[in-house]
Amino acid sequence: MILPHAFDLADVKSAMEGMCVQQMAYQCKYYLKDSKQASKRRSMLLSCFHTLDDCRFTLETLEIAASIVDRYFASKDGTDLASKADSSVIRLVYMTGLYTAIKVAEPSCVSPYMVRLWAGRQFSEDEVTAMESRMLQAIGWRVSNPTVTAFVQHCMALLTDEFLVVPEDKTDFETIATYQAALSVLDHSLLNVEPSVIGLAAVKNALGEDVDYAADYITMVGDLLRIDPWSEEMEQTQSKLEKCEA
C-alpha cells in the first residue's frame, strides 16, 4: 500500500484524476478588495497556523480552514458581513473555519469553548456554533476540498526510484513540498490558482537540482493533471511558493 486508499500506482493516478474534477467544485473567486484585506487575511491565517502547530495538528488542516473561510467571504453573505463587521467578527469567522476544519480533518475534535479560549474570549461558544451554521450554509456544506498537500502526496507516490538521483532523498523532498503546500494559503495571489498546479509547483521546488533528471516524471504528472509543468504560470507559482514564510 503506497497511500492509505491506494494499493498501486494505477489507484494513485485514478485518485488524482478524481481530485482534479473535485477541485473545480471548490474554486473561489478573488474577493479581496485591497492590500489591507489581504494583509488581514494573512495575519488571521498565520494565527491559525500557530494554533494548529501548538496543538500538534497537521498543517493540511490549515488549507481546509482557509478554503472554508475564503469561499465564505466570496459568498454574498460573507461579502455583506465583511463590509460592516469589526475585527472581532472577522476573527470569529477565521476561528470558526479552523474549528470546522479540525472536525473534518483531525482524529480528535475541539469544543467551541476551546475556540473561545484561542480567541481570547472575544466571543461566546454560541456565537461559534451559530457562525459555523451560517458559513456552512453559505458554502453549500462543501468542506472536503482536495488540498495542495493531498496533490503533493499523490505526486510523490508516483516518484519512483528510477526518477531519482539518490532514492533516499525522496523523504526530504516530500517534507519540503508538503511544507510549501501548507504555507501556500498565506499568499493571497494564489487564492484562485488550482491546488493541482500549486501541488506540482511545490514538488518541482522540492526536487531542486534534481528536477532536470526527473523531467520525464514531471511531464508524466503534468499530463495526468492536465497542466503544463513547464509553463510561465508554473514558474510564477514556484517563485511565489519559495517566498511563502510563516
Image (tube, rainbow, N blue to C red):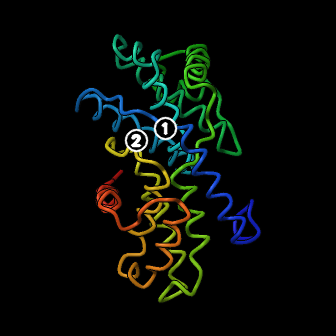
What is the quadrant of residue 111 in the picture?
top right
SS state under label 2: loop
Residue at (50, 29) in percent of width and height: 95
> Rounded to the nearest whole Å, what is the CA distance between mark 2 and mark 1?
7 Å
Asked whether 152 or 62 is in front, the reply is 152
Q: Residue furthest left?
A: 35
Question: Can you say whether 98 is above or below 146 in the image?
Answer: above
Instruction: Judge the density around disc 1: few (<14), some (14-19), many (≥20) Cα neighbours within 10 Å.
Output: some
Q: Quadrant of the N terminus?
A: bottom right
Give amino acid for label 1: Gln
User: Label 2: which residue?
Assistant: 192
Residue 197 placement (x, y as % from top left)? 44, 56
| Labels 2 & 1 near each other (Cβ < 8 A) | yes
Residue 25: which quarter of the image?
A: top right
Residue name at image x 32 percent, y 29 percent: 32
Q: Is residue 57 visible?
A: no
Instruction: Please indicate whether residue 102 sits to the left or right of residue 84 in the image.
Output: right
Mark 1 highlights which residue? 27
What's the amino acid at mark 2? Asn
Residue closer to the observer: 111 or 129: 129
Up/down of 125 relative to 184, above or below: above
Q: How many marks?
A: 2
| First-in-chain label (2 vs 1) | 1
Position in image of residue 69 (x %, y %): 48, 30
The residue at 68%/60% (across/down) is 14
Q: Is residue 77 left or right of residue 6?
A: left
Q: Residues within 10 Å of mark 2 (few under 14, many from 20)?
A: some
Rendered view: 238 above or below 49? below
- Image location (x, y in percent) of residue 167: 54, 86
Name the disc covering residue 193, or none: none
Q: Is residue 208 visible?
A: yes
